[in-house]
């Protein structure tokens, strides 16, 4: 753990951004801070979209209907990383599967998917 991660709470968006883009936690933390995220506070979807663009990636926003974390894989293209926002939580899609240590989120409803298209 870095010094930032050991002191940070409510950082699921930072972790998801780092996993989906392949950038370091520190770089993603700064990109989200520059996009309006306050330390140890929740992150909003518009902040994630701004941070993706600040990191030099293009992003496609989707708002799927009737999708849960259990079925999100059916709605994400294979090989295309994404950040998935479910009720109160952000996770990363690495192009093959959801990357998240908290399996309790599996039944939550997906509110938005940010496909990371590339540079």
Image: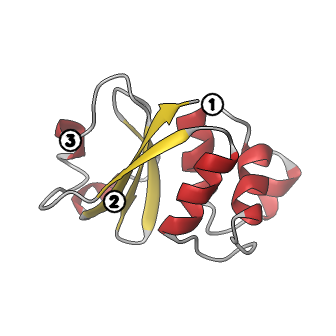
Q: Residue furthest top?
A: 79
Is the C-beta separation of discs 1 and 2 under 8 Å?
Answer: no
> Horizontal placement of 62 versus 89: left or right?
left
Residue 77 position in % (x across, y down): 27, 30
Work out whether mark 1 precedes mark 3 in sequence or the reverse, and give the earlier one. Answer: 1
- Examine the rendering and report whether any part of residue 76 can be seen: yes
Q: Give how far apart the Cα atoms at labels 2 and 3 are.
A: 11 Å
- Examine the rendering and report whether any part of residue 12 can be seen: no
> Horizontal placement of 61 versus 110: left or right?
right
Q: Residue at x 53, y 71 (%)?
A: 44
Q: Is residue 83 above or below residue 85?
A: above
Quarter containing the C terminus: top right
Circle 2 sits in a helix, a strand or a loop, which is it? strand
Q: Residue at x 69, y 70 (%)?
A: 37
Residue 11 position in % (x across, y down): 63, 62
Q: Which residue is mark 2?
A: 112
Is the C-beta separation of discs 2 and 3 under 8 Å?
Answer: no
Q: Are there few (<14), some (14-19), or many (20+) residues within 10 Å of tag 3? A: few
Q: Which residue is mark 3?
A: 75
Work out whether mark 2 precedes mark 3 in sequence or the reverse, and give the earlier one. Answer: 3
Identify the disc placed on residue 77. Answer: none
Residue 47 position in % (x across, y down): 59, 65
Q: Give how far apart the Cα atoms at labels 1 and 2 are.
A: 20 Å
Identify the disc placed on residue 22. Answer: 1
> Horizontal placement of 67 versus 22: left or right?
left
Quarter containing the N terminus: top right
Q: Quadrant of residue 13?
A: bottom right
Is the C-beta separation of discs 1 and 3 under 8 Å?
Answer: no
Work out whether mark 1 precedes mark 2 in sequence or the reverse, and give the earlier one. Answer: 1
Q: Are there few (<14), some (14-19), or many (20+) residues within 10 Å of tag 2? A: some
Residue 89 position in % (x across, y down): 44, 64
């Amino acid at each position: 753990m870095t010094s930032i991660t050991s002191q940070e709470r409510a950082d699921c968006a930072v972790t998801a951004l780092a996993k989906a883009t392949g950038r370091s936690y520190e770089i993603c933390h700064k990109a989200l801070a520059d996009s309006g995220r306050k330390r140890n506070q929740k992150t909003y979807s518009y902040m994630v979209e701004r941070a993706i663009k600040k990191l030099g990636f293009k992003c496609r926003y989707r708002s799927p209907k009737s999708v849960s974390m259990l079925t999100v894989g059916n709605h994400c293209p294979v090989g295309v990383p994404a950040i998935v926002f479910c009720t109160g939580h952000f996770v990363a899609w690495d192009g093959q599967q959801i990357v998240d240590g908290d399996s309790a989120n599996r039944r939550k409803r997906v509110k938005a998917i940010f496909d990371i298209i590339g540079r």
